[in-house]
Amino acid sequence: MALLSVVILGTTGYAWGALRNLNAGLSGQNIINEKLTAPDGATDILLVGNDSRTDAQGNPLPEEALKKLRATDDGGASLTDTMILVRIPNGGERASAISFPRDTRVEMPNNYGKHKLNSAYPRAKSEARDQLRKQGVTDPKELERKSTARAQRFLVKTVNKLSGVSVDHYAEVNLMGFYQLTKAVGGVKVCLKEPVDDSEYSGAVFPEGTQTISGADALAFVRQRHGLPRGDLDRIVRQQVFMSGLAKKILSAGTLSNPAKLSALMDALKDSITLGKDWDVVSFAQRMQGIAGGNIKFHTIPVELEGESGKVTVDPEEVKRFADNLLLPPEQRKAKQRAQQAQEETRSKTTVNVYNASDISNLASRVLRELTSAGFTRGKTANADSKQSQSTVEYAPGHKAAAQQVAKELGGLPLERSSQVSQGTVAVYLGDEYSGPGTQKFAAKPAVRLDGASRQPAQQQPAQQRSSEKPITAEGVPCVH
């Protein structure tokens, strides 16, 4: 995280010199498969926080270091509990960082099946180690290096499959690295809405209010999830406000213009950061130096958190749309958001009645359920007075726009203006040919807002929580749980 801030925000002559020396000192392997990359109008970087108890060279951390981290040596399963995709549109004037909740269940490549996102890395690493041993690789360091590279590539493929984004660069930081980076910058200012005591798990024990934290305290702050109202989703918010504070700290004149602080920062990076081998951070920095703190926004992919079970689910198509929208220029994005909000308002004010004019039993009820889940107000269902072969959507004068949305949701049914339909109401007549949402052949998808949220049936709302929130930027110190 500090590396990203430095290469984007470093502007002093001393910083450029330090960055040139940094390129030669960073650990890295050929992680990104060139076949994965594509000219999608952005530079895309996958940032990963790994809980491995090793340094960037794969050497086990000594007991003394583990004590500093408040960590034991039996928890290093190489879980990637922090995964953030940074999208920087060509031109380099702004950046969007998208967090991926660790417990999100996703369909993995290579027929791995559906599993939690943070298990992609260790699953691939374990399989790679077994294959390498069968191939005769016995040296522990070679096993670690090669299996880690395969795990990193597999995680990139998994994120690519979920988001539709072709990752261009990869950066990974471990526990010790995070500890050293926060110490090197002199700590980061954060704010809590209430005091916390998670001494049993993460070691996070903090008072209410604004405070500056670093080292083991900073690590505990971004790792805590027990005791937070939304668990991992609130932990992601913690990580985002910490990163925004880190970017703000590095932007300050007291960091990059101070040779001693910058030297300590570079040393920490060399000890703890793993990069894709072909990433030239100096060239990247020269292209990205125009970004200011307020132009770095932190988001979370749209997910559903299901009640007390804590199960995190996601619609991959929704995630892809969300990632694409972040590349739009701010004004276009706002215009699209306004249009989407207007559409949602129209749906909420439109009552839909559905009449079954076919021989399919219970069809009207199923179709109305689909329309309600898409945001329309529930009306009534009934059998039509007579059978008809052609489905239609009838609307009152002045309500064509609402009828068009209903017709589109049902697969493009024809429209018909009728003085028999009440104001604010749309009537749907389902004929024998109907094969859209509500039948076995199709399933309606919920309407998607630009912020990633989708409408759910009213009775499901208490059991669902959405991840969509106002983006966090590197300005101010927002108070969080």
Image (cartoon, rainbow, N blue to C red):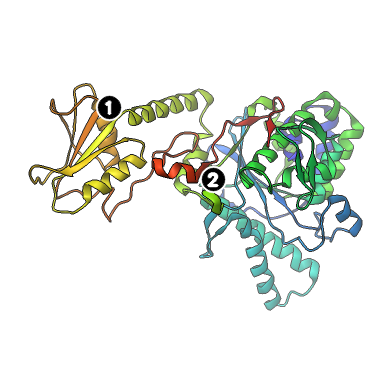
Query: Does residue 35 appear in the picture of this structure?
Result: no
The disc label shown at residue 165, or none: 2
- What's the residue type where badge 1 is placed? Ala
From the image, tell me which residue sits under label 1. 401
Q: Quarter of the image containing the N terminus? A: top right
Please tell me which residue is depicted at 70% across the width and 32% down the height of the picture: 193
In-front residue for pair 415/439:
439
**Which of the 4 quarters of the picture holds residue 457?**
top left
Q: Is residue 302 left or right of residue 120?
A: left
Determine the image quadrant of residue 410: top left
Q: x and y percent of residue 381 in the render?
A: 21, 42
Q: Residue at the location (57% across, 55% down)?
A: 157
In the image: residue 93, left or right of residue 13: left
Count of numbered circles on the image? 2
Q: Position of residue 303 (x, y in %)?
A: 52, 45
The picture places residue 169, in percent across and down from the top left corner, at 65, 46
Query: Looking at this view, is 35 or 439 the one in front?
Result: 439
